[in-house]
Amino acid sequence: METVPLTHILFVSTALFCIGMYGLFTRRNLITMLMAIELILNSVNINFVAFNKYLYPYKLDGIFFVIFIITIAAAEAAVAIAIIINQYRTHQSIDVEDATELKF
Amino acid sequence: MFHLLQTNVTQTVSDASSAGSYFPVGIQLLFVVGMIGFLMVVTHLLGPKRHTSDKLQTFSSGIESHGDARQPMAIKYFLVAILFVLFDVEVIFFYPYAVNFRGLGWSGFWAVLMFVAFFLCGFIYIIKKGALDWED
Amino acid sequence: MNALIFSAVSGVIMMFSSFLLNNKNSVRVLAHVLLLATIIANIFELRGISFFHIDTRGMLEFDRFALLFTLVANVCTFAFFLLSSRDLEKIGNHYSDYFSLLFFILAGIVVSSSFKSLLMLFLGIEILSIPLYILTGSDKRNLKSNEASLKYFLMGSFSTGLMLMGIALIYGATGTFQTGITVAEKVPVLLITGMMLLLFSMSFKVSAAPFHFWTPDVYDGAPTVVTSFMATVVKAAGFIAFMRLFAEEFGSIRPEWKLLVGIVAAVTLFIGNITAVFQQSVKRMLAYSSISQAGFMMLAIYSLSNDAKEGLILYAAAYSLATIGIFAVLVRMKDYTFEGFNGFAKQQPFLAGILVVFLLSLAGIPLTAGFLSKFYMLKATIDGGSLALAIFAVLMAAVSVYYYFRLIQSMYFKTGNATISGTTTGFKYTLAALAGITILLGIFPNLLTNWLYF
């Protein structure tokens, strides 16, 4: 089987990271912003797995880190959904532009 | 035979990043895109167009549709969904244990048991809090 | 290890206490008892007696620095419990849950102050942050609290993303998560990039400029009790993690980041102090003052000497105690603006006097702990080779005197009717004890720093 070179995978993960960053900065819908954050975390996951597989294949450090990232991301998403629901209940919208209470 | 395979693999790995090795992929991409485009254009040109109200309706297994799908849902669904995600994802820690539980021995077993106990604490907590009570 | 296990188990016990105890008073007493047990267990470990022998496989190391900071954080939290636990009640209906979240934050503080592996750094920071997102938004009916938690969550998880990317790049460059890397002549670009990303994300977490913009809003929007905890213990824990990370992981590539950290410290000092001058609300002023104090704590990371280590612990204690004290009074005030404190000294001469001690400590006036901790920082900075940065820091400390004294001025020299409610004698005595500790540490700092070496 042909192996994909490491740089290609890193390219994909960097692209995902940048897309996530872009989405976080430009989107105003909270759910989309949450998705952008998850995208960033997943790009990091790809990075870890790729580094582990290509550069340091004799230990599984990177893959275990990925497991921790996945669980933390789930916990973070749960908290985020709770915050967003609360926001919707008070503002009747999940647009960040409507959250203007703290503007000065 | 084995040696033959070996040499082949190393050879292909060494020139994997050269542009030439992507040629078949490129051909296939072109073919796929061309095929889809061709089919779409041809069906558009050749197919008859008769718009009736029945045809434009959303089709769902022959059951008549009514209302909008984007209705606010009861908050309980969200709660159950979030809890499911949490408890579902935490199970990922069993995976490394399952792969080599023989090697980890009793200490690994106690560690996993402790993990499950903490887990169970959370579960008892949400039951006691009434997060899973479906009827009010 | 003692403190970690005790605080984690205490959190679980507090979770269940709402079902077993139906009296709010007993919940509060239970929380105090559990925290006291944690403190005692930690002191035992500081004296070399560990109750648990768990092989952490080099992921955590409970050295004196970490243990002493854990002690400081726990004691400050105890002071916070004594002063403000009644005010936690007013946030919402889930009284015992707030305590359990606070205990989980303490567990996160222990992990993030004693990590030896980047994995533990990440876990510690997250265990510390996620309960804080919840606590920030715990006042569910308050729009400001909602938005503050939203903002905090977005900023926090963004910086988590940056931190993870940094760790991934460091892993790519070195192949290990253990701290204490050794580099050859030429530092790999991957390592430098990862170090920069970690620097940015840690600056986010401790709200150092130019990554501070979320701080005033979040501190302002969060329930005041929570702000008091967030601005003190958690921020100090962030700095301990920051210091550990840069001393152990990046200590060998110091020339690469020293200038950058110096610039961040200077900018933080400048922005925090100058903006604090213009604030009308005491709560917001304290938020900006926390940024400016963060600038001072950044100086410890800049210099990384033994003095800086001692100074950082002392700074954490001095700053936390003073700010917790001021916040405890602020929570009970009716009006949070400077005008709200007009004539406070006439009505509550005792409390006003104690507040003056705290404010003097924050401003860094001699005979208080705040002065000595600032002094340690400046000494370390000058030894670290930058006289200019130290002079700039002194200038900025002089600016900070303005806004701290403005509060004293409105308490003593203006007439008005400041209204405060719910000051019991126990509350007053606790505050007086805190002020006493502040002065005591200002005269005998060795009481605290000697714990680092015996």
Image (spheres, rainbow, N blue to C red):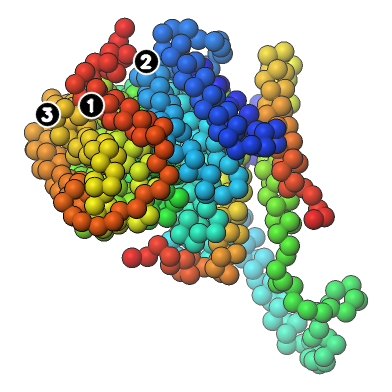
C342 versus A66 height, above or below: below
> In 3D space, how far apart are the residues under numbered discs 1 and 2 (Cα atoms)?
24 Å
**Residue for badge 2:** C64
Residue at figure coordinates x 70%, y 56% from the top left: B78
Residue at figure coordinates x 67%, y 43% from the top left: B86
Residue at figure coordinates x 68%, y 50% from the top left: B82
Nearer to the camera, C89 or C40: C89
- Tell me the amino acid under the disc marked 3: Ile
Nearer to the camera, C128 or B94: C128
Q: Which of the marked residues, 1 or 3, is nearer the chain's N terminus?
A: 3
The image quarter in which residue C425 lies:
top left
Label 2 secondary element: helix
- Tell me the amino acid under the disc marked 1: Ile
Q: Quadrant of the C terminus of chain B?
A: bottom right
C208 versus C305 height, above or below: below
Residue at figure coordinates x 67%, y 20% from the top left: B111
- The image position of residue C419, as x and y in percent, is 34, 53
> In 3D space, how far apart are the residues under numbered discs 2 and 3 (Cα atoms)?
25 Å
Give a yes or no on whether discs 1 and 2 share a subunit. yes
**Residue for badge 3:** C382
Nearer to the camera, A61 or C215: C215
- The image position of residue C244, as x and y in percent, is 35, 26
Q: Which mark is residue B37?
A: none
- The image position of residue C335, as x and y in percent, is 35, 56
State left or right for residue B127 relative to residue C143.
right
Q: Chain of mark 1?
A: C
Residue A52 at least partly seen: no
Label 3 secondary element: helix
- Tell me the amino acid under the disc marked 2: Arg
**Residue for badge 1:** C439
Q: Chain of mark 3?
A: C
